Image (cartoon, grey):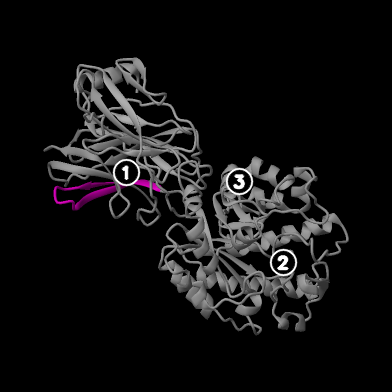
Amino acid sequence: MGISNLWLLVWLIAPVPVQAQVVPAPDGAPLSQSYQVRLRLAGTESWQSAPVYAFFKQHDYNWAQTTESHFVTFGSSGPIEVEVQVAGEVKNAEGHYISSQESNSEPSAKGLTTARPRQTDDPLVNPFCGWGIWAGPRFFDSRRFSIEYDTSGFGDDAPLFSWVLIDWMWADLEPKDGQFNWKDLDTVIDYWKARNKQFLVRLWVTTDPGWAGKPGNKCCPDWLWDKGVKYHEYTGEGGVLQRCPAYTDPSWKKVYLPLMKRFLTAYRDRYHQTGGPIMMDQVMGFGDWGEWHTMWSHYPWPSRQAKRDLLAEIIGSYLEIFAGSRSPSRPVPQLSIAQVYDDDCGGETPLTEAMKRQALDVAAERGLAFSRHGFIDGMGGWPDDLIARDWKTNPMIAEANWSYEQVKNEKTHGTMPEFVDAFVRYHSMYAHMYLHSASYKQAMAEDRDQVQRALKPGGIGYRFALISATWESTRKPGETLTLRQKWVNRNSSWCVYPYRLKIYLLDSDSRDVWSGVDKSFDPRSWLSGTTYPMESTFPLPDKLKAGTYELRLALVDETGKPQVRLGIDGADTLLRYRLGSVILTDK
């Protein structure tokens, strides 16, 4: 909005300048720096409300509208500025910044209505981003967990977490050749699906060296070796002998690979449905812990080219199974792959060469998500260079190098504020710290504020906020309603899902009368720091009756269901956001 518009607005409200006062919030406010804003007209004794917006400038977020007898508390972790703009004049108020804006849903002289929703800084939990909890029959230190522990044992529905990391062993799911046991996995997925969680699934099909002195879990079923698959034996944690497939032996291609693909296909056919809860599967067909390296088992490769060729074949197998019908030109963010060092690919390796050796260039070209294992004391080297180069095109998953309980108990792997800062700095779309039932409860008791901080403006994943929306104040049935919008993404990553814009007209009894979807709307390219103007047109049906209708807006999935919590006020119980009204006149 220009200075002239600011002047016009304030003049219509009151023909005198507006003053602002910023006062500290009461003791015990939950934020590190909190303020309350209220306004009065110059020359008067009492504080009054005025239709202006208070804008606290901190990474371009935290808006709120003052309203009568209601003052909004703001917070920031750093310095903020406040000014008052009135009739083109800037007035300072204790070094803070207030920007006048026209009031929400005010008709203009041009027959248009503009809404500027109040921006919020609440933690937002949305699909395809955010925090994950962990579930599986065995932890990475070989502890066995019951199904109750993986479900109701969490004690609540994990409301700050949007997804569940599932780690499950091939040996448990296909204990006998061709005989599958899905019962326990069904139970875990059904439980968390009913609580609106998505899933990142890792099916362990290679080897588990163990962790922190504890022996690893059995990944491959014994019958696999009985069928003639050769293995490479090595000593894992706790001095226990472990096996991994002999990748370069002829039996790998002749026996192991077809059986692995059969297993993955059976899993896909059972759990992958359109609109289902599986948001991602990880490529686990190579390496220790399925992490795309053999730094523990030290597999003896005959040549770098032989290694690259085999890794590319594994990636191709997963693409065939999970994205077989997808055009090679379309990205596949529903698959992820670990990107860490390897015996012959240390951190000092140039990025282009490292990508070639690990066949990660194949993954990058197909748009796979990259899972960076090692947060935060294992960071550095070419994996960090990969994030800096590709985070805008390939989703980034941040995995803690040590579990939350180890971070807290050993006190040598960083602090939770440092983890959150790093997750944000590396543009993480997803983050997890192996939070199982007990450690989840500990995190909620000791670090809930840090979990929430990662979901606030400037945090991980995406955070879409509507800055303004303008539409015709009056329309006739059969005409087109045009909605011009300005959007921002206030968080450090982006969104992989092509959400569409849907608007609703509600009558005076709040009943849906009509809705329309803009199928050209697509927020996947939105990054922080840019304002995105959008224009959506909606043909109105001839049958609509004359009257005043409430206009609401939502971001919806392919079924038309609202899915996204926006960083603005005004949501109803269906995640539709109130904008204002539109009048339909007789034709």
Q: Who is closer to the viewer here, 311 or 454?
A: 454
Q: Give the residue at x 29% y 15%.
A: 87
Residue 436 in sight in this render = no
Cβ atoms at labels 3 and 1 below 8 Å apart: no
The span shown in magenta is 500-518
| Residue type for callout 1 | Asp
Q: Which mark is residue 569?
A: 1
- Which image quarter is the C terminus in? top left
Q: Is 508 part of what is drawn in magenta?
A: yes
Q: Work out how far the residue at label 3 is from the one at label 1, CA to CA, in angstroms.
A: 29 Å
Residue 562 in sight in this render = yes
- The numbered mark, 2 or 1, whose residue comes first in the sequence reads 2
Which one is closest to the eye, mark 3 or mark 1?
Answer: 3
Judged left or right of residue 297, residue 319 is: left
Q: Whole-percent x and y of residue 18? A: 27, 21
Q: Is 319 part of what is drawn in magenta?
A: no
